[in-house]
Amino acid sequence: MDSRTPAVLARGHHASVSPEAKKPQQVTVGGFRIATQKLPILKADPIEEMTKKLGIAVPEMIFGDNFVSIEHPQSGWGINFNAFDALDLVDKTGQSMLQVAYSKEWQQSREKTHDGIKEVVKPFDWSYSTDYKGTLSPNAQPFEQTTEQIPIELLKRPDPILFFDEVVLYEDELADNGIAMLSCKIRVMPERLLLLTRFFMRLDNVLIRLRDTRVYVDFEKREVIREYQAKECEYEKVRQMLAGTRDDIPALMRDANRLSELLPVVDKRNERVVLEK
């Protein structure tokens, strides 16, 4: 996924697009302000600073200035998705570290990648798995657990897309043995929006993992539903599931959308907040 792919902005309806051509891209719909920013990968000095703050080595491709944010200025509510906060939730104890032969290979590759930067020696989850669900603004109304689901049928309607963007937060090829990537995709319609933040990890011959956070906003109701869903399965089991198809199996193993249809759910939780008027 190219982090430099331009956002799609559409004028009309109740959307007012920020007139500045500079980043971040911004649109306001129904009292909600949505913004995205996509900049190049961090340079050596910011990488070193982030490494020190996090206490772990950062992924090969770290887009530390990228973000997606949804704000409701009237109520003071907001949620932001960024690389630093996501990586700060990566296990730093080593207890969740995948104990496979590739881990030493990964460590060696990391020394070469960030040559000159003092590496943190302590073990950590080098697959960069995170259950990051976004960063709430300091005074935001908190989410509460709910059984209410995101209304998929409403999202299937052919409503005009006022704003669309895809933003990569970080990516690592796990020493050429797979992929770990955190990315966001957002689409804004006249009456609602949907944001999908997806962590996708494929460690070849070991494990495939998906962790999706969806944020749904109904502008008129001022209702926000956040759904977190984690799926994972052993690599070989997934490969066997695909063995009966005539499709290109290696290509399918790189297709997070297709894999999402196959992987079993290991964790799911829904939360909801209705913003005060």
Image (cartoon, helix red, strand yellow):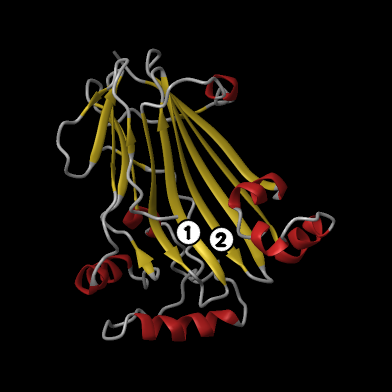
Q: Is residue 201 above or below residue 121?
A: above
Tag shown at residue 181? 1
User: Residue 179's x, y, as percent?
Assistant: 53, 65
Q: Are marks 1 and 2 in contact (CB under 8 Å)?
A: yes
Please state which amino acid type lies under the numbered disc 2.
Answer: Met
- The answer to whether residue 81 is visible is yes
**Which residue corresponds to mark 2?**
201
Image vertical order of residue 138 relative to residue 188, above or below: below
Q: Residues within 10 Å of mark 2 (few under 14, many from 20)?
A: many
Say what amino acid the circle numbered 1 marks.
Met
Q: Which mark is residue 66?
A: none
Q: Position of residue 83 (x, y in %)?
A: 35, 55
Q: In the picture, which quadrant includes the N terminus?
A: bottom left
- The image quarter in which residue 109 lies: bottom left
Give residue 108's quadrant in the image: bottom left
- The CA span between labels 1 and 2 is 6 Å
| Count of numbered circles on the image | 2
Q: Is residue 121 visible?
A: no
Image position of 137 (left or right of 123): left
* Residue 142 relative to residue 42: left or right: right
Q: Residue at x 52, y 84 (%)?
A: 105
- Give the residue drawn at x 72%, y 61%: 249
Looking at the picture, tell me which residue is in the foreground, 231 or 274: 231
Q: Earlier in the sequence, mark 1 or mark 2?
A: 1
